[in-house]
Image (cartoon, coloured by chain):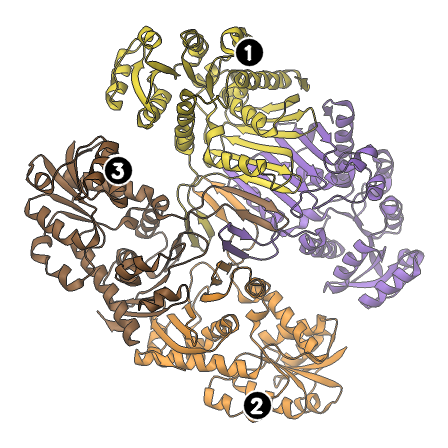
Chain colours: A yellow, B orange, C purple, D brown
Amino acid sequence: MNKVAIIGAGRIGRIHGKNAAHNSRLELAGVVDPIAEAASALAAELGSKVISLDEALVDPSITGVIIASSTDTHLDYSVLAAKAGKAIFCEKPIDQDLERARSAAADLGEARMLLAFNRRFDPNFQALKARLDSGAVGHLESVQITSNDPSPPPPSYVAASGGLFKDMAIHDFDMARWLLGEEVSEVYAVGSCLVDPAIGELGDIDTARTVLKTVSGKLCVIANSRRSGFGYDQRIEAYASKGLVRADNVLESTVQVWSEAGASADRFQNFFLDRYAEAYRREMDHFADMLEGAAASVGYADGIAALALAEAAARSVRTGLPVRT
Amino acid sequence: MNKVAIIGAGRIGRIHGKNAAHNSRLELAGVVDPIAEAASALAAELGSKVISLDEALVDPSITGVIIASSTDTHLDYSVLAAKAGKAIFCEKPIDQDLERARSAAADLGEARMLLAFNRRFDPNFQALKARLDSGAVGHLESVQITSNDPSPPPPSYVAASGGLFKDMAIHDFDMARWLLGEEVSEVYAVGSCLVDPAIGELGDIDTARTVLKTVSGKLCVIANSRRSGFGYDQRIEAYASKGLVRADNVLESTVQVWSEAGASADRFQNFFLDRYAEAYRREMDHFADMLEGAAASVGYADGIAALALAEAAARSVRTGLPVRT
Amino acid sequence: MNKVAIIGAGRIGRIHGKNAAHNSRLELAGVVDPIAEAASALAAELGSKVISLDEALVDPSITGVIIASSTDTHLDYSVLAAKAGKAIFCEKPIDQDLERARSAAADLGEARMLLAFNRRFDPNFQALKARLDSGAVGHLESVQITSNDPSPPPPSYVAASGGLFKDMAIHDFDMARWLLGEEVSEVYAVGSCLVDPAIGELGDIDTARTVLKTVSGKLCVIANSRRSGFGYDQRIEAYASKGLVRADNVLESTVQVWSEAGASADRFQNFFLDRYAEAYRREMDHFADMLEGAAASVGYADGIAALALAEAAARSVRTGLPVRT
Amino acid sequence: MNKVAIIGAGRIGRIHGKNAAHNSRLELAGVVDPIAEAASALAAELGSKVISLDEALVDPSITGVIIASSTDTHLDYSVLAAKAGKAIFCEKPIDQDLERARSAAADLGEARMLLAFNRRFDPNFQALKARLDSGAVGHLESVQITSNDPSPPPPSYVAASGGLFKDMAIHDFDMARWLLGEEVSEVYAVGSCLVDPAIGELGDIDTARTVLKTVSGKLCVIANSRRSGFGYDQRIEAYASKGLVRADNVLESTVQVWSEAGASADRFQNFFLDRYAEAYRREMDHFADMLEGAAASVGYADGIAALALAEAAARSVRTGLPVRT
């Protein structure tokens, strides 16, 4: 069993910590958090212990570090962990600032670093990708990514979020790159504030459509809204030369009611921690693979690329013009 | 174009008359109905003319007769038409009384007679049958037929209907025979009055389950209720050695609403004339085939067999015992 | 019954002619076509007669004219019919050239003219619109229109088609306007040639994504491809403040096969004449309404507006820039 | 945390042991199995230890016993555990022999005993039951239970299984009782050997239809086959006075492929341990509830009742007659 430490004992730290603790190939050797109470609560829950950041970095038996702290610390902790020779599991995004993120290239460009874009590990999207890769529907031509939150966050969250593209769509930019299999050469985005005027007052948008075009002419549309009104809306359609592969939303159960009003299915899953519970488990399992020698399937360079697309999209909305990348 | 006359200008006569009038291979040469007003109204609507029964039978240019009159006249008109050398399109059932229906065997056993079990001509059920016959799922083992009306008829209708098995399930017995492809050797039926006590007071049931077993051991269950609560419920599942073929209910449209309550589809079609509109057209088209020489795909013998199963099911409910056939 | 004449006895003329002839409120009084054989064949099939253009226009008993001739004649025949005081049913598009189409404003701006955008009459899309208009899901925010042909037309067709936007997407521009309920202020389109290199050699594209933004900030994406690989792909998703309304593709039947490979449904309808058969009937019925006094629900101004969006989209692809409208 | 011991370290013991070990309210204090190797392997895997049956029964700190041993030992171990004052989690069935099972009534009739009919704990079936109980579709009238295995077991398994009704349908009899909410008064079953002749040679059947009727006239049909050909087929339809509630099969993923052949979904889950993984977790969680004082939701009396229905069904097949219960 490989020993790992986790930095960050908040909501997402609890998810990753649990998955590490329950993974049969990992041992959660320590929990790091400046808030002592949070650290000790999580350590107790998971049968681990509180350690300091230094201990985590110095202990040679700890070969991997899970970074689940606040976004503005991702980059610094990653660099520290890289310098200490640890394998890194870093929650997305790499950073909110592209220039800053790029400045760590010397330290992180070659690091053994898993940037945890969880959707790449979702069983449904993995099944979709496998179908595409199998060639069963020919070669890919275009992609439609639909990614809407159930309901808008409070304005205070929005204010610190980095904006819709860096906060929400960053996942979709990564999915687009993963599926398209080649780099994007042009980004056009259009946005509106249709859901909550308070978001507009903060200078942000809550509804967007982004069009990506790749070097070879493949097209991708990303649809985002801060509020679907019906649940967590996470769908992909991939058009290929012989047909279409799609992954749909996930329902609470298979139950249907048939009444005079027609057939109604159960509710859509509403919460991202439910929708991606298995994805979180699988990405931790991939980290276990890495600690046994495997290469990271998604890392620093992918984080930079997704962030660059997010900045390009934001610029496109600001200028009203397409942006070449 | 082959000339046909129709006997009966009521609701079902209007359906068959229209389909005959609009069929490019048929000419509706006359409408027969003892109620002069009904006959002339339908003749006017369809660009045909009122004729007498005798005229219909004697006119040698009329080669086919469509019998859409009340059930108790089906047998007599069929015999008259057969004796006159006409091809016969007779609305189901052949009769409500098995002995009486059998007594016409000498006249009708060899007649060119289409007994209009409309469901055999439904595009969905025909597609299901085609898949089974293609062998794509191996050989058939068992069948589930679900056949529920949207809401119960008035007691007055029930009183004259011949009972649930002869009135409703007669269609399902025919479907079972059509799909099973061999004769039924045993019938067990159980019934309850769960929908409308007035039906029970008439000595009838409104809910039934019938189990059929064929000589080779294939099994079939027929589920019937006078009231589904959600629309016209007409479904079939055919289990075969390599899988299942099923035909589902038909919806009013493809529209769905996704809301907090979940995904809801449009209403189920509620009315048999909508659900089977195309089936009625196709069975009339098959009659046109017959007038051009084709053999009837379903005829007198099938009417007798379905009626025998209905009587067996009714007996099973009465006695509480399975009935060998 | 109102008498109508049809100009054009080709494929689409046959559809409209049949629907006129079978409509209980219309009488098809004549068929006009410069190709005498085509005119007489259609007239014979529909129980009508061949007449000249002049006869159609002069005969005062003919109150409506159906224009189903080649696109380049739509405008001229419409003007002639308008001058003759006829109600006009004109197959889309109004013309391939926006300036030319606009030049007829004096004659057609006030004409009783139904511009036959058939999709507005499709039962599924009408049901979708009705749900939106009912307010059941709140107010509309954005629309996704997916409109892919089953397989690409021959290059010869493409060459004369006016290009993807005027030929295919013209329908989608009209649908967008119909659903959005306000005018589009900005158009951005991106196109690729991914399906058939011959289309690219003609200077056209076969795959496009178009983003529309309205004055109030509503967003609409139109996805087009000359080839879906799986059938006629005609879907709409309308996002509103309380949820989503969608209309899906239509299947050949409700039959499913469940096998080791999973559940497979029947094929998607492949041919637009099947998919929109009922839409064509309903638009002819709307023409009957017009002849009885109703206003056209879609007319000359809508044709101009859709054409303007098509030209804007084409310009956007050419320049790589969004186009204000 | 309540301490529990598990008896039986085979396939199902591993499932229950794991769920106990991972349940935050339970501590797996020991593993009992006559095969020492099996016991120590499971104990090691779950961080528990090997203990003897006597130790499990005598240790007062162990308050619950999980019986996951072979079927013929369920009754004896349950009686021992009851006499030792333990709460009992006993894998179904209570026994293969109704008389023998009934003979333990004095010891087990009042025991704190969870008879682990896992399907009652399946999230889909629980959601279905909740909808029924909510009254949203009125009162229940009839139930259709479809329960087909993916493929037949080897004849050796069948020979020791107690036959289709006790081995497979025992679950369905319990589901029927759970949903119908009243006792069954009549059972009719018909069976065939259609799947594997070797099963017939053993005097068993592989395909059955069972009709249950309750005192008040509610009807239930159970469809069973040893081989669906497409996966684990576990569906329920409950007909109520205002509509239908149904729970469908579970798919491997939400992925669909749309191709010329139509839309195909992913495969059906094939293995009962996948299909009911969450049910197994939930029933262990219910055992934790019991150890904290809750009453068992399903126990000895339910095991007896289901077994009685299985024997009645087998007798009905043997005699060809319905059996009153």
Disc 3 crowd rating (10 Å Cα; few below 14, some 14-19, many 20+) is: many
**Of the pair B288 and A30, the residue shown nearer to us:** A30
Disc 1: which residue: A98
**Residue D30 location, quadrant:** top left
Chain ID, mark 2: B
Cα–Cα span, label 1 and label 2: 89 Å
Q: Are marks 1 and 2 on the same chain?
A: no
Residue D61 makes an appearance in the image: yes
**Of the pair B76 and D195, the residue shown nearer to us:** D195
Cα–Cα span, label 3 and label 1: 45 Å
Chain ID, mark 1: A
Question: Amino acid under label 1?
Answer: Leu
The answer to whether mark 2 and mark 3 are in CB contact below 8 A is: no
Question: Amino acid under label 2?
Answer: Asp
Disc 2 crowd rating (10 Å Cα; few below 14, some 14-19, many 20+) is: some
Q: Are marks 3 and 1 on the same chain?
A: no
Task: Judge left or right: residue B206 versus residue B103.
Answer: left
Q: In the rendering, which numbered label is found on residue B76? A: 2
Cα–Cα span, label 2 and label 3: 72 Å
Task: Judge left or right: residue B194 versus residue B233.
Answer: left
Say what secondary structure mark 2 lies in: helix
Chain ID, mark 3: D
Give the percent coordinates (x, y) of residue C242. 49, 36
Give the percent coordinates (x, y) of residue C86. 84, 53
Does B35 appear above or below A24?
Answer: below
Disc 1 crowd rating (10 Å Cα; few below 14, some 14-19, many 20+) is: some
Disc 3: which residue: D19
Give the percent coordinates (x, y) of residue A255. 40, 48
Residue A149 makes an appearance in the image: no
Point 68% across, 47% down: residue = C119
